[in-house]
Image: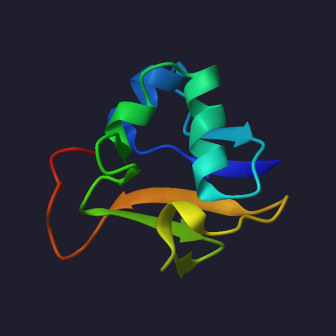
Amino acid sequence: MAEIWIPPKLQQLTGGNQQVQVEGTTVRRLINHLEAQFPGIKEYLIDEVEDDLIPGIAVIIDGEVSQLGMLEKVSENAEVHFLPAIGGGCLGQL
């Protein structure tokens, strides 16, 4: 399972956990499994209307910034971070 690092502002949804283990072969599947385990977390990561990551959210997989967003493949033992993009957008969100 992939290891997901939870931003501090979302840790209230994971019972205070900074890291959680989640199954998924793509970022989309990871987020869907995160939502199943921790209801409400998806709304902080996904724009439902656009069916994509919220603008200003970056996905970092094994130290590399994803260019494919929700479609990015994730290996079984990947380390995944959801972070505010450095260029701005939603620094207050996460």
- Total labels: the figure holds 0
Direction from residue 3 to residue 9 in the image, left or right: left
Picture layout, residue 89 above or below residue 93: below
Residue 84: image location, x then y, percent: 29, 60
Direction from residue 66 to residue 43 in the image, left or right: left
Residue 76 is drawn in which quadrant? bottom right
The colour mode here is rainbow
Residue 54: image location, x then y, percent: 29, 53
Viewer-proximal residue among 87 and 29: 29
Residue at x 24%, y 63% (from the top left corner): 56
Picture layout, residue 87 above or below residue 50: below
Residue at x 55%, y 39% (from the top left corner): 18
Residue 36: image location, x then y, percent: 62, 23
Residue 42 is drawn in which quadrant? top left
Residue at x 75%, y 48% (from the top left corner): 24
> Which quarter of the rendering shows the C terminus?
top left
Picture layout, residue 42 above or below residue 64: above
Residue 2: image location, x then y, percent: 75, 52
Viewer-proximal residue among 44 and 71: 71
Viewer-proximal residue among 68 and 20: 68
